Image (cartoon, helix red, strand yellow):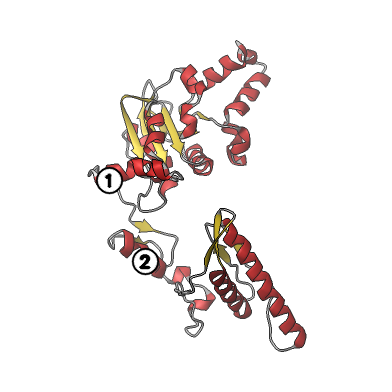
Amino acid sequence: GCSKQAAGLPARTVGVDSQHVTFSTQRPRLLLCAQTNYALDEAVERVASHGFFRRRSHGGGWEVPSIVRLGAPEALSHAIQRFSLDAKCAALARDPYSGGGGGGKDAMRLSLIRSADVVGCTLSGAGLRVLDEADLVFDAIVVDEASQATEPQLLVVLNRLAKGGTLVLVGDHKQLPPCCLSPRAAAAGTSRSALERFCALGVPVRLLSIQYRMHPHISAVPSLRFYGGLLRNGVSAEERQAPWHANITSGFGPLSWHDVSSPCEQRADGSYLNHAEAERVAALAYELLVHWPNVQIVVLTPYRAQVVELRSAFDRHRAVAGQAGDSGGGKGSGRRGSGGG
């Protein structure tokens, strides 16, 4: 949803022709940013897959922009490596017709950045010295995952915006907020994103009101809780059916709530765990596996200690299921659910 919009927005922020930019002489220079490498790489891949510059001459047609992705190569996804500044420098140095880039590696890096239509970097990467040395400003800046960006982080990006340029924030302030571990910093206001501030001040917001991922029974919850009932479904219940949905006696359905009232949350090694919740989740997972052995189960938790606790709970249930199978008194697949977080 948001990443797809982030990839398509740069063109619409600086041009006309509905979804794509029409240019005649000078192309706009765009900076594409995100809080995380993963989100940035996804946005860069979408931009690379769908050209958004349209020529007035030479038969028209869409043209893929020249892209340079800043950042350590090991932090980039495999699909994006070809756009990394280091990879482009290496390719230019090997090109017998380029003269090895001329002027050394630093001059080569600056030349590649200055000639790029789109530069991609994380929010912190917008402060890299190489951008200072390139002495660049951008006609438009698009920030994906803007709800996770603190205001100081966004100020680094804004320093790169040309006078009269366009800033587009893509995100959802109803979802993940910025990560702020310091209570003192949070009290000073850094736990609130610029996107949330702008929304509170009445800056126009475009809501992506159609969702295509969730079963309608699931999407009804965030729609009513966070979006005032405005969220609509682009998929039907039939398109998101699972085998256990039809079995009304299973107690699962598309969405079910289980109250674990035992107050046994514990702190462990700087994280948190809850033994009762882990046991309940493991029991539910194995109940699903008994009736639907081929089902794939994913268990999500934000706490490292709870991941360990969940794995232990799954091991205990697997052992019990194995003993029951050996004695002929029951059945169990022995498959293990996956903890994540």
User: Along the line of sight, which residue is nearer the eye, 174 or 162?
Assistant: 174
Task: Report x, y in % for residue 245.
Answer: 48, 77
Reply above or below: 173 against 250: above
Reply above or below: 198 against 273: above
User: Along the line of sight, which residue is nearer the eye, 226 or 277?
Assistant: 277
Identify the residue under disc 1: 199
Mark 2: which secondary structure? Answer: helix
Do the residues bearing badges 2 and 1 touch, measured as CB atoms within 8 Å?
Answer: no
Q: How many C-alpha atoms fall within 10 Å of the one at disc 1: few (<14), some, or many (≥20)?
A: few
Identify the residue under disc 2: 221
Reply above or below: 275 against 271: below
Task: Report x, y in % for residue 39.
Answer: 49, 44
User: Along the line of sight, which residue is nearer the eye, 246 or 159?
Assistant: 159
What's the residue at 57%, 69% (across, down)?
275
Residue, far top: 103
Q: For this view, does 210 lie left or right of residue 32?
A: left
Q: How many C-alpha atoms fall within 10 Å of the one at disc 2: few (<14), some, or many (≥20)?
A: some
Mark 1: which secondary structure? Answer: helix
Task: Report x, y in % for residue 272.
Answer: 54, 59
Task: Report x, y in % for residue 186.
Answer: 38, 44
What's the residue at 52%, 57% (across, down)?
302
Q: Which amino acid does label 2 sit on?
A: Val
Of the two numbered discs 2 and 1 on the same chain, state the one appearing first in sequence. 1
Q: What residue type is labelled 1?
A: Cys
Q: For this view, does 83 lie left or right of residue 24?
A: right
Tag count in the figure?
2
What's the residue at 68%, 21% (across, down)?
94
In the picture, the disc for residue 238 is none
What's the residue at 59%, 76% (across, down)?
283
